[in-house]
Amino acid sequence: MGQSFFKVAIAAGAIAVALGAVAAKAGPLMDRIENGEAIRIGFANEIPFAYPGENGDPKGFVNAYTIAVLAKMGYDNIEPVNTEWGGLIPGLKANRFDIITGGMNILESRCENIAFSEPMAKIGDGFIVAAGNPKNLGNYEDIKNADAMMVTGAGYSNIEAAKAAGVPEDKIMQVPGPTEILAAVKAGRADAGAGTYFTVKQLAVSSDGAVDVSDANAMPEDTFNWAGIGFRDADQDFLDKFNAAQAEYLGSDEMLATVAEYGYDESTLPGDRTTEWVCANR
């Protein structure tokens, strides 16, 4: 606890000291840091957002960004924890790691389970489709109207977006992640593979022409999402400090240079939307 806490508590009297000590207790992440333990960052294999390198080291623009913000805060003892996408929120809540750096979109349903930093990226959806896009699938309405099969990752925000557009649940195939999305489209088991535009663009590049990327401009504005860094609700004290450091770093020349190799540029900056707004509107 800092000196400012004690000044407030003393001014409020002995009873306020006792009550304030409980309210201001450090969260579990600060307890770990004060005990000399590493900050554990959890992420899945989601190129180019966050993924393990050849030696398991954290790669991707969200990892690079988060590690840089933590360094600005004075923390460099970082431990990467790789898991499946669907295990990120459960793993955070079960204390298997301390921060989600996977490039997770801020959604109302997720805000009910964890706390998010202020947005660090604005991200649109996209599809991979068979070469030439024979069914002309550019958005979720097209998938519904064509009675097409869509594949996406378990827990992805694309599931909610597709349902909101009227795509029936039996037309939404859920798989563990990007590798399986690509395999389903290449094998013809799905007509469109949905993910963030960053993800599907990378899949198309890796397919040697087997699949194409749909036109990102065909997606309606309300399918754009804002990504944030995930924290436990109990770590609000740490999250407040993270947001303060992020506010100075986000959009700086230093930050843009750090994430440029992963395709993040000025067009990906989140704008003026707040986490409060996104939680209420997504």
Image: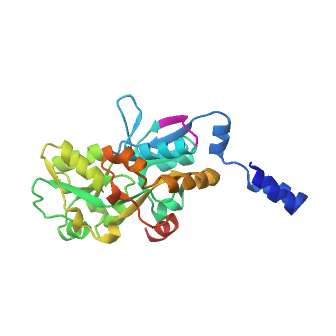
Considering depth in this image, is 211 or 67 the residue closer to the camera?
67
In front here: 246 or 58?
A: 246
Residue 228 versus residue 9: which sits nearer the camera? 9
- Residue drawn at x 19%, y 45% is 205
Number of labels in the image equals: 0
**278 in relation to 87, above or below:** below
Residue at the (81%, 56%) spot, across then down: 7
Residue at the (25%, 47%) spot, across then down? 202
The residues colored magenta run: 74-80
57 displayed left or right of 115: left
The image position of residue 153, as x and y in percent, is 33, 51
Is 156 part of what is drawn in magenta? no
Residue at the limit of the structure toward the right, as seen here? 14
Colour basis? rainbow
Locate residue 270: give its quadrant: bottom left
Q: Quadrant of residue 83?
A: top left
Camera sees residue 165:
no
In the rendered image, the quadrant that contains the C terminus is bottom left
Q: Where residue 78 sits in the image (x, y, percent)?
A: 52, 36
Left-right relation of 82 to 11:
left
x and y percentages locating residue 244 in the rendered image = 57, 55
Q: In the displayed structure, would residue 87 be above or below residue 4?
A: above
- Residue 79 colored in magenta in the image: yes
Instruction: For residue 73, say whether it is visible.
Output: yes
Q: In x, y percent, where is residue 51? A: 37, 40
Instruction: Kindly indicate the quadrant of the structure image that contains residue 226.
Output: bottom left
Residue lying farthest front? 253
Residue extending furthest top?
Answer: 55
Front residue (pair 217, 95): 217
The answer to whether residue 233 is above or below residue 257 is below
The residue drawn where x is 46% and y is 59% is 119
